[in-house]
Amino acid sequence: MSKKAPRATLKFHMKKNKDIRIGKNADLMAQLNLLVVLHRLAEESRVKAFEEKSATIKVHHVRAVAKKLLKSVRG
């Protein structure tokens, strides 16, 4: 990921709801959270590909891991 999301756009979307107080660097925290999620997804996809003895990470590895991650987040 060579480009970052524009800070102004993130702040605009985060401030749509006027009832919620947002800190100064909340947009940076959102970007860091996204990077952590993508890193976790990549690592677990790599493990899944390794389990299947695949040399490359393929789409079905990422989808399987993403489905598993979403189930664990939802409860």
Image (tube, rainbow, N blue to C red):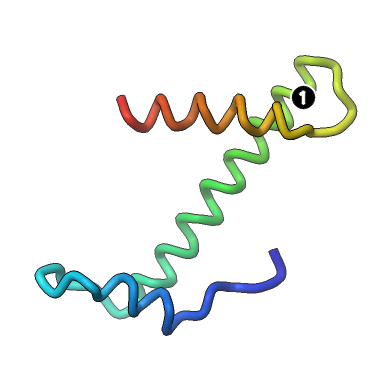
Q: Residue at x 46, y 80 (%)?
A: 7
Residue 12 % position (x, y): 33, 79
Above or below residue 58? Residue 13 is below
Residue 53 % position (x, y): 85, 17
Above or below residue 75? Residue 20 is below
Instruction: Please identify the residue farthest to the top as the structure is shown.
Output: 52
Q: Residue at x 41, y 74 (%)?
A: 10
For the C terminus, the quadrant is top left
Query: Is residue 29 left or right of 66 when viewed as pictured?
Result: left
Identify residue for label 1: 49
Query: Is residue 1 left or right of 41 when viewed as pictured?
Result: right
Query: Is residue 72 left or right of 20 when viewed as pictured?
Result: right
Q: Secondary structure at mark 1?
A: helix
Instruction: Identify residue type, mark 1.
Output: Ala
Q: Residue at x 59, y 28 (%)?
A: 65
**Toward which corner of the image does residue 28 lie, by quadrant?**
bottom left
Query: Is residue 18 left or right of 65 when viewed as pictured?
Result: left
